[in-house]
Amino acid sequence: MSHLRFSIHDDRAAVGRAAAELATRALLDACSLKNTATLVVATGSSQFEVLAELAAVATIPWERITIFHLDEYVGLEPTHPASFRRFLRERFIERLPSPPAAFHDLDSMAGDPHAECDRLAGLMPQEFFDVALIGIGENGHLAFNDPPADFDTTVPYHVVELDARCRRQQVGEGWFSSLDAVPTQAISMSVQRILATRTLVCTVPDRRKAEAVQATVEGPITPSVPASILQQHPRCFLQLDREAASLLRPCDTLAT
Ligand code: GLP
């Protein structure tokens, strides 16, 4: 049985506000329970509004929040407009009202990407993350775990090959001028490490995500739709706009 809880909003701005509110509540709850909290941040156009809204929340004690980076291309200069490290610094970290406890970002230019995975693994908390902001790709990917995704690996980060559809999405969104310019490899947080999070806030706007959303919500749990595994998570909040939700069965949308 699916545990997914989803909400459908009128537009991207409303999706972003709702996602940031969910993340804020979960971070504040974690801080009041144990004084500190951990947050995983994603990139891509789905996160524009979420990160802008969340960075403006001055009631979050940012100096007690440790931030982890969901995924990054291998071999992309950190000054490139598509660099996720650059995206997160410019759109989130530098906009916070006060510096976070730490931001453990991934180095796209690390000589050995496997060693970079190991470095980050050494910084992982032993327990679950408190909150992760995630998205779903046009091909149903979770972070950069493209289909068929590895649902079993227990390493926190791994080096993955990017599939053609994922790489085309990046060109379609304007991050790269051609398919050849898109790296073929990335470092991604693994599916199991993403699932080891207390509250998942999954933000998915746009019509071009409607098929992936339908397969995630209504289809079987399968590595060919990596995000379908979210059905198993006890606290995953899927935040959709009307277009991304447009292929869902009426009975699913009534259940929100
Ligand atoms: C992107 C990013 C991830 C993001 C996911 C969905 O390509 N690498 O950080 O969570 O894949 O992103 P989007 O919503 O932009 O498709």
Image: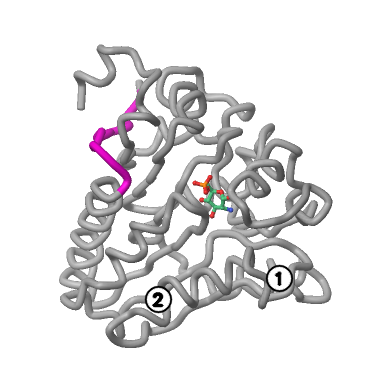
Residue 116, relative to residue 100: is it above or below?
A: above
Identified by mark 1, the residue type is Ser
Secondary structure under the numbered disc 1 in the rendered image: loop
The residue tagged 2 is: 66
Left or right, residue 190 beside residue 199 = right
Between 256 and 182, the one lying in front of the other is 182
Q: Is residue 3 magenta?
A: yes
Query: Magenta segment range?
Result: 2-12
Q: Residues within 10 Å of mark 1 (few under 14, many from 20)?
A: many
The residue tagged 1 is: 108
Q: Residue at x 33, y 61 (%)?
A: 130
Q: Are marks 2 and 1 in contact (CB under 8 Å)?
A: no
Identified by mark 2, the residue type is Thr
Q: Position of residue 33 (x, y in %)?
A: 18, 69
Q: Residue at x 20, y 27 (%)?
A: 256
Q: Residue at x 40, y 61 (%)?
A: 129
Q: Position of residue 3 (x, y in %)?
A: 31, 30
Say which mark, if any, is on residue 193: none
Between 148 and 178, the one lying in front of the other is 178
Q: Quadrant of residue 57?
A: bottom left
Q: Position of residue 20 (x, y in %)?
A: 26, 58
**Mark 1 vs ligand 1: CB below 8 Å:** no
Q: CA distance from mark 2 to mark 1?
A: 20 Å
Q: Quadrant of residue 112?
A: bottom right
Q: Position of residue 100 (x, y in %)?
A: 37, 82
